[in-house]
């Protein structure tokens, strides 16, 4: 079912008043999309009846608005049909308003995204950054033995405790009411967040499993309970937990960034990925044999799946980064990404030439960029807001920068609406 058929069915289901209100809200957002451009976000899931559903939302500085959801049970595995579905939503939003379309990184969506970029030559398909980072966590668990063993033991501890209500009550006396499990938007992130929580409560756990209350309970005298006790009191387990967190913690920072509603992540993800790698290297005391396998796993996903010219261009145009002493002005990847992005997003050759000239003013902080206020505000304002304030002297560059810097990096908005649409589609 295409979006036109969908809206016919929505009109019947919603009634005139509700639909009119939704149309008026959407009209307000469309005016914003013309000015700042936008990101189309899509995310697929399976409902209780095993149907494949795909949600479509649009993100811009004004916020995220829901467009529609489709039953994709018959098309979700076929790249050509997925391409048609994505192409329809671009047509509905207006190609001139769209900078990127974000989906998950499944092979069918990747193939459909490439087809979309061939037809729509002035937008990007991007994989969801949150999904890609989650896949990095999955790779750690698959390919790094210490992670695999430690996560398995961590799960054994939490599964054993949370399967017994009386045991939870006993433990909370020692943890002061704190839980051992921290839910997250992704399964593998949850595994590492749980390890982090276990690490924080290490002293409480060891006190509990060494206490008379535990040892005299029916749990402490059981064979399974004694096995869990052995894991908790094993110093090697805690050493391995620390090793896992040295790897995971820097990437958790990026996951929170791309999952945030507070600021658009596009201007920061390029630098944050490099910073995360350097932090991991530091955590292992710069010992190559310790951090190199981790770097290889990150690079495999970043270089082959996640990284796009948009990330490099946004890094270059972000005033938070550009005027720092460690800004990579001579980095070939950054400069190539900037100009490739400009070529794709700016149709008119004459306009691109003007942007090139205006880039000099930005880079050397001339004109409005040289004002003291511009320097003071670049760290306290969002990058897009900074360009709105100080970019008037370079209008063509200002529009290009705002279009790039206001982009999101993930389809988090779709995921947060799953529960709502679960009810809609199982009515």
Image (cartoon, rainbow, N blue to C red):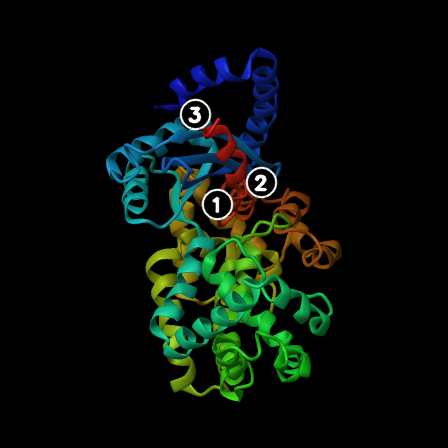
Quadrant position of residue 174: bottom right
Q: How far apart, in angstroms, are the residues tagged by discs 3 and 1?
A: 19 Å
Please report the residue visible at 28 percent of the width from the left and 34 percent of the height from the top.
Answer: 75
- Element class at badge 3: helix
Q: Earlier in the sequence, mark 3 or mark 1?
A: 3
Label 2 SS = helix
Residue under pointer 3: 92
* Drawn side of residue 332 relative to residue 253, left or right: left
Q: Position of residue 119 (x, y in %)?
A: 29, 34
Give the percent coordinates (x, y) of residue 171.
Answer: 66, 71
Nearest to viewer (mark 3 / mark 1)? 1
Q: Could you classify mark 3 by the number of other residues whose Cα lies within 10 Å: few (under 14), some (14-19), or many (20 or more)? A: few
Disc number lying in front (1 or 2): 1
Q: Toward the viewer: 192 or 330?
A: 192
Measure the alpha-carbon separation of dots 3 and 2: 28 Å
Q: Position of residue 43 (x, y in %)?
A: 43, 41
Q: Assess disc 1: are there few (<14), some (14-19) or many (≥20) residues with their C-alpha within 10 Å of its C-alpha.
A: many
Q: Nearer the viewer, residue 228 or 291?
A: 228
Crowdedness of circle 2 by 10 Å Cα count: few (<14), some, many (20+)? some
Q: Pick whichever, 355 or 265, lies toward us.
A: 265
Q: Are marks 3 and 1 in contact (CB under 8 Å)?
A: no
Image vertical order of residue 186 relative to residue 27, above or below: below
Q: In the image, residue 13 lies at what x, y percent?
A: 50, 17
Cα–Cα span, label 1 and label 2: 30 Å
Whichever of labels 1 and 2 marks the residue nearer the N terminus, that label is 2
- Is residue 302 visible to the viewer in this orientation of the structure? yes
Q: Secondary structure at mark 1?
A: loop
Which labelled disc corresponds to residue 411?
1
**Marks 3 and 2: which is nearer the front?**
3
Residue 178, which numbered label? none
Q: Is residue 166 above or below residue 290?
A: above
Dot label at residue 395: 2
């Amino acid at each position: 079912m295409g979006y036109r058929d969908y809206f016919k069915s929505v009109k019947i289901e919603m009634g005139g008043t509700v639909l009119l209100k939704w149309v008026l809200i959407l009209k307000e957002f469309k005016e914003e999309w013309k000015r700042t451009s936008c990101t189309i976000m899509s995310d697929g899931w399976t409902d209780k009846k095993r149907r494949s559903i795909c949600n479509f939302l649009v993100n811009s500085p004004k916020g995220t608005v829901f467009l529609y959801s489709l039953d994709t049970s018959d098309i979700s595995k076929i790249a050509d049909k997925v391409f048609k579905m994505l192409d329809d939503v671009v047509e509905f939003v207006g190609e001139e308003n769209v900078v990127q379309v974000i989906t998950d990184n499944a092979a069918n969506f990747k193939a459909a995204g490439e087809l979309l970029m061939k037809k729509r030559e002035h937008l990007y398909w991007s994989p969801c950054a949150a999904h890609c980072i989650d896949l990095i966590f999955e790779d750690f668990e698959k390919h790094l033995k210490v992670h695999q063993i430690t996560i398995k033991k961590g799960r054994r501890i939490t599964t054993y405790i949370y399967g017994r209500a009386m045991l939870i009550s006993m433990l909370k006396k020692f943890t002061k009411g704190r839980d051992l499990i921290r839910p997250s938007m992704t399964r593998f992130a949850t595994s590492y967040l749980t390890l982090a929580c276990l690490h924080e409560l290490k002293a409480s756990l060891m006190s509990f499993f060494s206490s008379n209350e535990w040892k005299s309970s029916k749990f402490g005298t059981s064979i399974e309970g004694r096995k869990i006790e052995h894991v908790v009191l094993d110093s090697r387990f805690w050493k391995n937990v620390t090793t896992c967190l040295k790897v995971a913690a820097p990437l958790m920072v990026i996951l929170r960034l791309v999952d945030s509603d507070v600021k658009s992540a596009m201007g920061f993800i390029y630098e944050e990925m490099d910073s995360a790698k350097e932090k991991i290297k530091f955590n292992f005391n710069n010992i190559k044999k310790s951090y190199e396998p981790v770097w290889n796993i990150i690079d495999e996903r970043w270089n082959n799946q996640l990284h796009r010219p948009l990330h490099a261009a946004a890094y270059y145009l972000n005033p938070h980064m550009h005027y720092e002493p460690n800004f990579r002005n001579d980095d070939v990847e950054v400069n190539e990404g900037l100009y490739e992005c400009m070529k794709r997003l700016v149709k008119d050759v004459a306009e691109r030439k003007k942007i090139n000239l205006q880039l000099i003013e930005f880079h050397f902080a001339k004109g409005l960029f040289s004002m003291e206020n511009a320097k003071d505000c670049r760290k306290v304002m969002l990058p897009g807001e900074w360009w709105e304030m100080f970019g008037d002297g370079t209008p063509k560059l200002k529009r290009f920068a705002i279009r790039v810097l206001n982009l999101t990096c993930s389809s988090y908005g779709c995921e947060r609406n799953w529960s709502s649409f679960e009810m809609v589609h199982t009515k």
